[in-house]
Structures are given as C-alpha cells and as structure tokens.
Image (cartoon, rainbow, N blue to C red):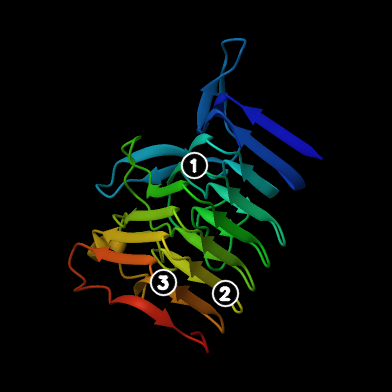
Amino acid sequence: FNMYYHNVDYTGSQLTASYASKAYFSGDVKVDTAPSYVSLSGATMTTQDRGTLYKPDGTTAAVTNQQNMEAGNVTFMENAHFWGRTTGSANFHVYGGGNFDVGKNAVIDLEVGGPNQWGESGSANGWPAVYLLAGAEFRVRDGAKVNITTNKTTGIQSTGRGGIGMENNAKLIVESGAELKIDLDKRLYSGYNGAYGDAIRMGTGGSVLVQSGGKLNLAMSNIANGYANASYLSMINMTGSGSFNVEDGGSLTMKRTGTTSTIPYIGINVEGGGV
C-alpha cells in the first residue's frame, strides 16, 4: 500500500515500519525520532527502546534506537524538503529490492545519532544513516541535494555512524546536476565501537555511479576520537566485487580533519575484486 506525507511536522517514535509499503514525501516534512515526546493529550510519552547514551565527555543523554522510517520504497517528490533526525539509530532502512528516490530539486537533510552498532534491529556491520538492503537503489536526481551529518543539533556529539550502507547488489546513483554530501564527526565515547563507520560501505556486487555534472562530497572530522575498537576508518569501503565510477565531468571530493595516530585512515579501501 501507499503512504503519503505532505507538510508534516512530527516528533515521536518511529514514523512507520512497513517493509513492503511505498512512502511518498512532498512539501516540507520534519521527522524527529525522539526519546520522549508530548502527546496530543498533553502527557509525556517515552519512546520504545529508550536508552542512555554516553557523550564523549562522559556525561549522559537519553536516546532511542528507533529509525525515522523503515519501508520498502521511499520517494521524495520534486521540490520536497525533508529533515530527519535520530539519536540512537539509522534514519532510513530501505528493504531488499526497494528504492530510495530523491526527486528533482528536492532537498534532504539527515542527522544521525548514536554509536554505529546501535539500532532497533542490530547488524554485524552497524547501521549507517541510510541502510540499503540487498538489491535496493538510492538515486539522487537532477537538481536534488542530500546532506547526511552526524547529530549536532541536540548536542549529543557521540556517533561512530557511517553515511550509506549497501548490502549485496545495492546501487547508489548521483545524477547530473545532483549533489550528495556526507559529513561525519567521529567523536565517540571511549567505551563504544567505532567500527564500520565508513562514509560509504558497499557489499558484494554493489555499485556507485556519479554521472557527469553530479557531485559526491565526503568528509570526516575528529578521526582520532573514533577509538580503538575500529581497526581503521575509510571514506569508501568496497567489501566485495563491485564498481565505483565517476564519469568525466562528475566530481568526487574527500576531506578529513583530525589526527589519525590511533586509527589508520584509508581513503578508498577495496577488500574484494572491485573496480
């Protein structure tokens, strides 16, 4: 079935979990998956799976490990503006064979929070901001802009999150005139695991294509504070056979700040037969 969200401002638990559904966003939509919220009756409600997060300085904050949404297909309509924030999980899970489609001139701003291993379902490879299950496709269309950052507006500042995770045969396409930006602050409490916090992590058979005129901008800061449970951090990690292509006229930039004395930094890491 189809779900339509137009000019919605929502604070609460996960917006929806409907694995075979199609979700459409238009107009201005804000989804803040919060550890607690005030209901229409005025009562303070606690979100499912609410927990306590240690900030880098050792103080604590309440978080929830629910996503903004789990769905089979997610479509942001032309000119839509979507803002989503989490405190202890990924923003979106897109299920196998589904699509995460950012329409022409749409603007998507995602803030992801919590250690990379935190999430409602759990995963050996962690949960980055957008997680594409096997065969899913993430497409950014002409004129659209997607910004993925670690959670900054709540002041939590403790996340080893990655940007985009791709299971086997998933695809990422940045079309001509489109821009995808991933900017990850790796500051993390010393007891947490920063492993798998790559900006883009590709499974076997995965593919990334930046078309001519498309832009892919990747950045990491405070790398040394990702802590020793991560053996390395990379901007792009190809874990099996697959492809990463930037067409002539396309743009790929990678920027890092912060010492790497405690954790090796790898710009592009190819573990399999990728090209």
User: What residue is pinned by disc 1?
Assistant: 105
CA–CA distance between discs 1 and 3?
Answer: 26 Å
Q: Residue furthest right?
A: 1
Residue 11, placed above or below residue 216: above
Which amino acid is tagged 1? Asn
CA–CA distance between discs 3 and 2?
Answer: 11 Å
Please state which of the two labelled residues, at mark 1 or mark 2, is closer to the viewer.
1
Residue 96, placed above or below residue 17: below
Q: Residues within 10 Å of mark 2 (few under 14, many from 20)?
A: many
Question: Do callouts 1 and 3 mark residues in contact (Cβ within 8 Å)?
Answer: no
Please state which of the two labelled residues, at mark 1 or mark 3, is closer to the viewer.
1
Closer to the chain start, of discs 3 and 2, is 2
- Left or right: 94 as drawn, with respect to 141: right
Mark number displayed over residue 236: 3
Q: Quadrant of the N terminus?
A: top right
Mark number displayed over residue 203: 2
Residue drawn at the location 36% of the way across and 65% of the way down: 251
Q: Is residue 120 visible?
A: no
Under circle 3, the secondary element is strand
Quadrant assignment, res 250: bottom left
Residue drawn at the location 37% of the way across and 48% of the way down: 150
Horizontal and vertical percent position of residue 94: 64, 54
